[in-house]
């Protein structure tokens, strides 16, 4: 009997990759907190996971006037964060908000790791016949 790791692990590997990418984006925001004109970026992981979990038919453009599929690379899906209190130099990074989002994402990253670890442990037990 074949074991499909994609089915066994579910969404967790994809969530882990997205959370790692979100860490990079938030770290970039924090690193540029003092850069004039820098715009804070972010993306909605839940929305991306919901969209990827639904089986969709890929769109195919057969003529030049057709609208292209918008499910491109993640960098194209980054959104700009609207600041609660804009700065005079045009920078939209608010350090306290970025730090809170970074900490929340780190906790969720660890939770995804634990879910994957639990699934792998269960698979190992099943393979050993325990």
Image: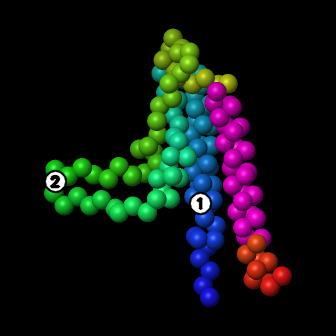
Residue at the (43%, 63%) spot, across then down: 55
Q: Main secondary structure of the magenta part?
A: helix
Binning the other alpha carbons within 10 Å of mark 2 as few (below 14), some (14 to 19) or many (20 upward) gives few
Cα distance, mark 2 to mark 1? 35 Å
Which quarter shows the N terminus?
Answer: bottom right
In the picture of the structure, the residue carrying the numbered disc 1 is 11
Residue sitting at the far front: 54
User: In what element is the residue under mark 1?
Assistant: loop
Residue 36 visible somewhere in the drawing: no
In the picture of the structure, the residue carrying the numbered disc 2 is 64
Q: Is residue 74 left or right of residue 110?
A: left
Report the mark closest to the observer, 2 or 1: 1
User: In what element is the residue under mark 2?
Assistant: loop
User: Is 6 covered by the magenta stretch?
Assistant: no
Q: Which residues are magenta?
A: 97-121
User: Is 113 covered by the magenta stretch?
Assistant: yes
Residue at the (47%, 40%) spot, across then down: 78
Q: Nearer the viewer, residue 118 or 74?
A: 118
Q: Is residue 118 left or right of residue 90?
A: right
Q: Nearer the viewer, residue 5 or 32?
A: 5
Residue at the (73%, 52%) spot, across then down: 111
Q: Nearer the viewer, residue 56 or 110?
A: 56
Residue 83 picture location, percent across and down: 53, 21
Residue sitting at the far top: 88
């Amino acid at each position: 009997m074949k074991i499909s790791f994609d089915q066994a692990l579910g969404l967790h590997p994809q969530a882990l990759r997205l959370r790692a990418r979100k860490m990079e984006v938030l770290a970039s925001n924090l690193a540029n907190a003092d850069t004039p004109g820098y715009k804070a970026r972010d993306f909605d992981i839940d929305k991306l996971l919901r969209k990827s979990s639904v089986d969709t038919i890929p769109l195919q453009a057969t003529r030049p006037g057709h609208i292209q599929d918008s499910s491109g690379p993640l960098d194209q899906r980054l959104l700009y964060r609207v600041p609660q209190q804009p700065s005079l130099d045009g920078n939209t990074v608010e350090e306290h908000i970025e730090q809170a989002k970074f900490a929340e994402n780190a906790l969720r990253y660890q939770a995804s790791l634990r879910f994957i670890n639990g699934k792998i442990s269960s698979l190992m037990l099943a393979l050993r016949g325990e």
